[in-house]
Image (cartoon, rainbow, N blue to C red):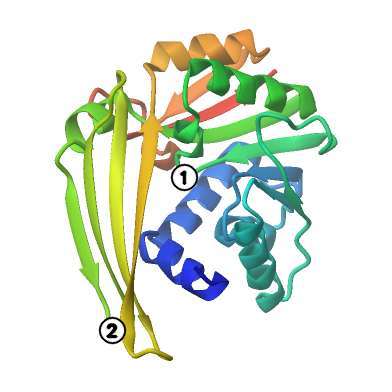
Amino acid sequence: MSYQTFAQVYDAIMDDSLYERWGHYVDQQLQNKGQRLLELACGTGALAVTLKKRGYDVTGLDLSPNMLSLANERALSAGLQLPLIEGDMLDLSEVGEFEVVTCFSDSICYMPDEEAVLGVFKEVSKILGSTGTFLFDVHSTYQVDEIFPGYMYNDQSEEISFLWKSYSGETKHSIEHDLTFFVYDKETDLYERYDETHKERTYSLQTYYEMLKQAGFSSIKAYSNFGDCEVEKESVRWFFACSK
């Protein structure tokens, strides 16, 4: 799949308005003092660019060189210099120290098990200064157990259409998303088909608190609705703000 096709596919399943809402949440927690910020799982750079425009000193990290190439193109198109690191958030030993670490769009939920999630939290704790802040979000157990199973969504445009179906995973509080894309190729005048399966897993609110404390965080706050509400039984996404 070419970079351009990859960008089309990725952007097709993302709601652009969410980037501004994540940016608003970061501003709520940090009061925007131009902090040195590392965005984990930065993907194609849409949020990193949004945060950079808001005044933060942003560096993006992602495991995928394809994603980072697209992130670099996005930053250059916006006239911004955006340092990018190809790396695994399970090993942040070479990235240096930051005042803030963010990890949004339920990227933590792609970790395969509790041990891996704890590993990420410990790595983040190591690179944050004594007054640093860790901001991230995850799917709630209500979202994974009650909303996602059986969920279906279809969308279509002239250049791309996709089918999205979700079903319960094999482990507790897990979900699998089957995505099928049909992308128009101008050269062949045909639609190319691409299939992906995304596996996600979440944990109880208490389990996240326990793992964060084990990783060295002493101040842990959880919210819903991009930080605008307290967590309720039917909150679909949890937003965390943590410091040591």
- On-image quarter of the C terminus: top right
- Residue 232 in picture, x, y percent from top left: 28, 25
Question: Going 51% across and 9% down the picture, which residue do you hit?
Answer: 210
Q: Which mark is residue 158?
A: 2
Q: Is residue 100 left or right of residue 166?
A: right
Q: Secondary structure at mark 2?
A: loop
Observer able to see residue 129: no
Image position of 69 with respect to 92: above or below: below
The residue at the point 56 percent across, 28 percent down is: 241
Image position of 44 with respect to 26: above or below: below
Residue under the image location 71 percent in, 37 percent down: 100
Is residue 20 depicted above or below 182 in this figure?
above
In the rendered image, residue 196, in percent from the top left (x then y), is placed at: 37, 52
Mark 1: secondary structure? loop
Whole-percent x and y of residue 121? 62, 22
Image coords of residue 137 (percent x, y): 47, 35
User: Are dots 2 and 1 in contact, CB under 8 Å?
Assistant: no
User: Is residue 102 among the parts visible in the rendering?
Assistant: yes
Cα–Cα gap, marks 2 and 1: 27 Å
99 and 33: which one is in front? 99
For marks 2 and 1, the one nearer the N-term is 1
Amino acid type, label 2: Glu
| Residue sticking out furthest to the left | 150
Residue that carries the numbered disc 1 in the rendered image: 105
Can you tell which quarter of the image residue 120 is in?
A: top right
Q: Is residue 130 above or below residue 68?
A: above
Q: Is residue 99 shown left or right of residue 181?
A: right
Outermost residue to the front: 188
The crowd level at tag 2 (other Cα within 10 Å; few <14, some 14-19, many 20+) is few
Kind of residue at badge 1: Ser
Q: Nearer the viewer, residue 65 or 122?
A: 65
Residue at 72% in and 49% down: 86
